[in-house]
Image (cartoon, rainbow, N blue to C red):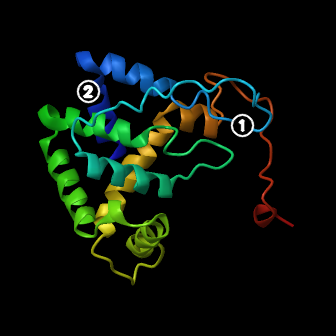
Amino acid sequence: MTRRDLGWLLGRAAAGGAAQEFLGEWLRAAQTHAHAGANPAAPPEPDRWSAYRPKFFNSEDFRALEAFASILIPTDDAPGAREAHVAHFLDFLVAAAAEYAPEMQAEWRRAMEWLRGRNFAGLSAEQQAALVAQMAAPERDRNRRHPGFPVYRLIKRGTVFAFYTSRAGLVEALEYKGNAYLEQFPACDHPEHRQA
């Protein structure tokens, strides 16, 4: 599925009755992500997501998806896939696909079955990261092949869409300010991009 397809499906899913509650909570996710300089004495906000029950994925697949997404977009000084609740969003979206895009559900079932066959959820964090790196190898070197590459591409595409659609990705990570304009466009400060 393309980003356009995912956007179309999100629009259709958002029209459903259960979507209002889910999307309202999901869009507020990551507002409490601790940044440098934040008040450490402030009491943490209760985790709204700890009681979440997946609608499409089983619990093992949901944990595997959450771990995979967190490898792709880890938490550092900005929120990552875990804080953006990427797995929750993908579960909502794929569950909503039943009526509008059943082929999407079949694709995700095959992907999670592939990961289950490698016991992804049962691997250590280091082993999971190593497997994801192996699966991603054809992306960096077109001469390489890996049977899990289509699974990697599917999860990566979904993760990127979910993360950069979320408050955590759009506002916290990209610092999107809304409909504002820049009077100046600051130059890139990466040394490797400077021109002599």
Q: Earlier in the sequence, mark 1 or mark 2?
A: 2
| Mark 2 residue type | Ala
Q: Quadrant of residue 52?
A: top left
Q: Residue 171: where, in percent of width, then height?
A: 60, 31
Q: Is residue 72 visible?
A: yes
Marks 1 and 2: CB-CB under 8 Å? no
Q: Residue 29: where, in percent of width, then height?
A: 51, 29
Which tag is nearer the camera, tag 1 or tag 2? 1
Circle 1: element type: loop
Identify the residue shown where x is 49% and y is 69%.
126
Please state if 14 lies on the left or on the right of 143 as rendered: left
Identify the residue shown where x is 80% and y is 34%.
37
Give the mark count: 2
> What residue does disc 2 label?
13
Outermost residue on the bottom side: it is 143
Circle 2: element type: helix
| Mark 1 residue type | His
Within 10 Å of disc 2 (Cα), the crowding (few <14, some 14-19, many 20+) is: many
Q: Is residue 15 visible?
A: no
Q: Residue 10: where, in percent of width, then height?
A: 31, 31
Q: Residue 42: where, in percent of width, then height?
A: 71, 24
> What residue does disc 1 label?
35
- Observer-nearest of 7 and 137: 137
Identify the residue shown where x is 29% and y is 39%.
91
Please state if 196 lies on the left or on the right of 7 as rendered: right
Q: Quadrant of residue 31?
A: top right
Identify the residue shown where x is 66% and y is 34%.
175
Report, in whole angstroms, how far the alpha carbon at label 1 lies from the one at label 2. 32 Å
Position of the C terminus by quadrant: bottom right
Please state if 44 lies on the left or on the right of 51 as rendered: right
